[in-house]
Image (spheres, rainbow, N blue to C red):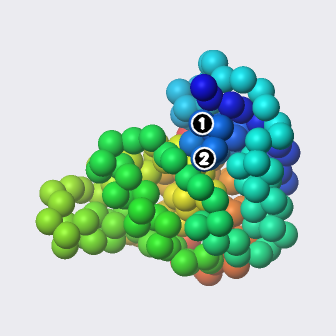
Amino acid sequence: MIYKSNCRFPYGVITLCSDGERLTALKLYGDRYYDHICGGGGTEKDDLEIFEKTRDWLGRYFDGQNPGIDELELAPAGSSFRRRVWEILCRIPYGKVTTYKDIAREMRGKGEKTSARAVGNAIAHNPIEIIIPCHRVVGSDGSLTGYAGGIENKKKLLMLEGADMSKLYVPKNVF
């Protein structure tokens, strides 16, 4: 059984999904993969303990605090390759950024044959946005690209975290 709950956040609505005990998805409404991950099915149930913990986590995050990822039971569904990429995302420090290329390089160092493009695809399909911090990944040239939740939201999240934005930019060809 899949359960859902919607909550407001400073930039709009977030949908939370759970298997009843663990968080399986957190998507910004309007995310390009929203319908695939959160659309259809599911039973509205706002009072699940995991939803209460997640709303508390998000409240502290949007208040400028740095709550730990390990405070929540997460169960993102994806291939073993995608899960390995998401594990790397969880190690990116609050307020810092890394690149798709750096993540691919780290994975190749562990014997994984991959490219920045494959890493980008895995990151784009991250089902638990914000908590698994895909917004902390940028292009190797400093471009703010590749955020399914929208480039403006990516920018706002990085600014909230106090990331150094001086070398980051929104490319002109983002649509």
Q: Is residue 52 left or right of residue 82?
A: right
* Closest to the observer, 154 or 80: 80
Task: Give x and y (percent) for residue 167.
Answer: 54, 77
Give the residue displayed 65% in from the left and 38% down from the top: 20
Residue labelled with disc 1 = 19
Q: Secondary structure at mark 2?
A: loop
Q: Quadrant of residue 42?
A: top right
Residue labelled with disc 2 = 22
Give the residue displayed 77% in from the left and 42% down from the top: 48
Q: Amino acid at mark 2?
A: Arg
Task: Give x and y (percent) for residue 135.
Answer: 57, 60
Q: Residue farthest to the top?
A: 41
Query: Quick one: quadrant of the N terminus?
Result: top right
Q: Quadrant of residue 93?
A: bottom right
Q: Which mark is residue 101?
A: none
| Residue 21 visible in the shown view | yes
CB within 8 Å, label 1 to label 2 = yes
Q: Is residue 120 left or right of residue 5?
A: left
Q: Secondary structure at mark 1?
A: loop
* Closest to the observer, 144 or 47: 47
* Closest to the observer, 107 or 120: 107
Dot 1, how many residues are within 10 Å of its Cα: few (below 14), some (14-19), or many (20+)? some
* Closest to the observer, 25 or 95: 25
Q: Amino acid at mark 1?
A: Asp
Find the distance from the CA under tag 1 to the CA under tag 2: 6 Å
Dot 2, how many residues are within 10 Å of its Cα: few (below 14), some (14-19), or many (20+)? some
Give the residue displayed 46% in from the left and 64% down from the top: 89
Relative to 163, say whether 175 is above or below.
above
Task: Give x and y (percent) for residue 115.
Answer: 24, 56
